[in-house]
Image (tube, helix red, strand yellow):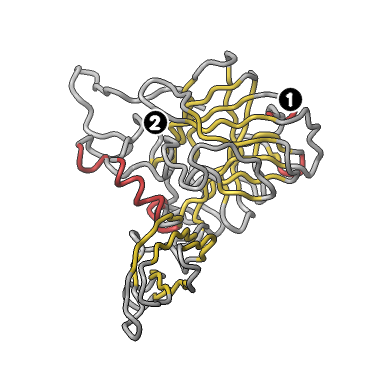
Amino acid sequence: MSNLFVNTITDASGGTTATINGYTPTVSNMAGRNKIINGAMVFDQRNAGASVTPTSSTYTLDRWQATLSQASKMSVQQSSTAPAGFINSTLITSLSAYSVGASDFFDYRQPIEGFNVADLAWGTASAATITLSFWVRSSLTGTFGGAVKNSAANRSYPFTYTISAANTWEQKAVTITGDTSGTWLTTNGAGLILQIGLGVGSTYSGTAGSWAGSNYLSATGATSVVGTNGATFYITGVQLEKGSVATPFEHRHYGTELALCQRYYEIGSFVSMTGIGNPYPTVPFKVTKRAAAASTTVTNSRSLTMAIINDASSSGYATAIYQNSNDGAANITYFTASAEL
């Protein structure tokens, strides 16, 4: 584990270094290096900042999923408590003093689409090293854990990091050697899954710092957040990038980051007014979806029929259009659509 972050790099003569993580450090080619979406925890389309108590597998803030073996042991909420340079974080609060069993697991994760990690070439002899960096704050101190794994859950790399002071923001970095084995998707499936452990039993915990042919979610001996009633755990500024150096967090433009989130989940509305016999109104999604979208919530002002039309003919990947029945009157339709991994 490394806690070194690059702001300015100079060579032995005092000049600027030629490369960082294999790139010449210019604005153009250092952009897009963060493979995490919503790493600054700014977007919470589903809950608008409200606290949620996840069940078995629940998406919370955009792109972030809480997975757990026992319900009602923790809550998840967008928070305005954040380190300098950030305005939001995720707050996870333990709701009891739960004793984690061997097969129990609690984690906060982000599945990363295969297209976005194809350049890592994992599963080949050319597998690239990655560096994970983030800001963390907890009421607990000690050794904490997490892991990265593939979609088949048969290749994983547990890691650890240390929280030294309670209720204090600390920045962490973990460098992971690329996996030359296993199958790592490079399509619109889950190419790589990042997991932050919050209490993981021995069945899903492995030795930190090495690859294993197992489904590990954290490292052996890591602190359990859910083991202490009222314990708090904040995280933000999550960045996963190619290379062995943790560069400063990539703050993408607000609209760009929102569009990245909307590829997987979108909330929207539209107004329509058509005459009887006219074609039904259609409204395209703001962003092409990762896969065929499923509607989770549909309401409108006149209780009319509304359907999702998924069309993959134009780009080879699922796009979607909303349609609602017409009755010659104005109608406002509200919708959500999910294409999560």
Secondary structure found at label 1: loop
Q: How many marks?
A: 2
- Mark 2 residue element: loop
Reply above or below: 12 against 47: above
Rendered residue at 31%/41% (across/down): 254
Residue 275 pos. (x, y %) = 32, 79
Circle 2 crowding by C-alpha within 10 Å: few under 14, some 14–19, many from 20: many
Q: Is residue 103 shown above or below 170? A: below
Q: Quadrant of residue 326?
A: bottom left
In-front residue for pair 52/197: 52
Mark 2 highlights which residue?
A: 246
Residue found at the very far top of the displayed protein: 165
Badge 1 is on which residue? 229
Is residue 211 shown above or below 249? below
Q: Quadrant of residue 68?
A: top right
Is 166 or 8 nearer to us in this picture? 166
- State the residue at coordinates (22%, 37%): 24
Q: Residue furthest front?
A: 329
User: In this orientation, does residue 219 appear?
Assistant: no
